[in-house]
Amino acid sequence: MAAAENGFHNGTNGAAHPVSRPLTAGIYAPIPTFFLPESEDLDLDSLRTHVVRAAKAGVRPLIAGSMGEALHLTHSERVTIIKAARQALDGAGLEQIPIIAGTGTGSTRETVELCKEAAAAGADYTIVIASGYYAGVLAGNKRALKAFWTEIAEKSPIPVLIYNYPGASGGIDLDSDLITELAIESPNLAGVKLTCGNVGKLTRICGTVSDPSFSSLYPRKNPDAPFLVLGGYADFLVPSSYANAHGAITGLGNVAPYTLVKLFELSQAAQKDPSLLPEAQRLQAIAANADFTIAKASISGTKALLEKLYGYGGLPRKPLPPIEPGVFEALWLHPHVQDIVKVERELSGKSSP
């Protein structure tokens, strides 16, 4: 494994571990970071419970991402939740499930440091967003943006995914040419998450990286980490599958993991058996509507839904506000939410929260 070669091991608590955890196509969820009421200290019990719940449904975890309020966490807290997630998965017999960790910070130097810390804590892959604090300088500077991910990929002991999310980075929006160049030139880059929602961009990138010749022409540093193209929402899984993309990293995976895994599986299978396409399209419409409605409620809304469904969720860290009770009631009763809750209960074999 590339991590071991650099003195890091992606095993339990950073200890040497022979398990290989490939990065494969599918559904990933940016796991919320849970906090205790009053103190806002980490609620590790809820984190462990939720990571295992998602993984058993077939959804793999991304720790300390946007949904995980990474910006509100110290380095030591990020390390703590990575370790807790690895412990929980291993303890549940899910040693093969990889962990992606968010390691984007303000500077290239600190991001590299955090990549190393994440690897030592048990992360298998990292995902990096460019800070929007100096977006006025960076947004139009292709050379600087390319240098950012190139250097991080070169110095990270574990493979790195690019996180393109203009809404969380001051409008910085990488185009398909730059992402494709990075994929070709940086062998330790393992993919991109497109939370820009640009299906045309996704299609153009897949035209290069999903071509059968790509892996032989531009082999990855770690053979377990091919370059994946992942959407940032659940509302275009079917069309993205037909463009040869590889799934999604989506907050909806926290609320409806069985539904999204089923949708992804149908999207893949329908390419060989067109008779499955109508059911894939039906589930896609339900997921798209739910994603559209729930995303508008942001982190606090997702946490409130988890509280309603599973008995844990809590509040975001300040200064993020909690969702107002009346607003949540309207969210819960919204037909888009009720539709996906119904499907999720059917697929998970449960008739009630």
Image (tube, helix red, strand yellow):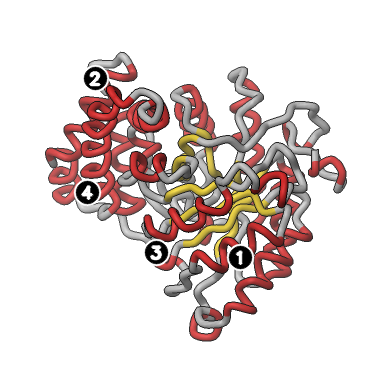
Query: Label 3 sits on what residue type?
Result: Pro
Rounded to the nearest whole Å, what is the CA distance between mark 1 and mark 2? 40 Å
Please report the residue visible at 38 percent of the width from the left and 34 percent of the height from the top. Answer: 312
Residue under pointer 4: 293
Of pointers 3 and 1, the one earlier in the residue sequence: 1
Of pointers 3 and 2, the one earlier in the residue sequence: 3
* 38 relative to 166, above or below: above
* Residue in the foreground of this view, choosing between 108 and 247: 247
Question: In this image, 329 relative to 183: left or right?
Answer: left
* Residue in the foreground of this view, choosing between 315 and 9: 9
Q: Which mark is drawn over residue 352?
A: 2
Mark 2 lies on a secondary structure that is loop
Rounded to the nearest whole Å, what is the CA distance between mark 3 and mark 2? 33 Å
Residue under pointer 1: 105
Of pointers 4 and 2, the one earlier in the residue sequence: 4
* 40 relative to 348, above or below: below
Q: Position of residue 156 (x, y in %)?
A: 75, 55
Rounded to the nearest whole Å, what is the CA distance between mark 4 and mark 2? 21 Å
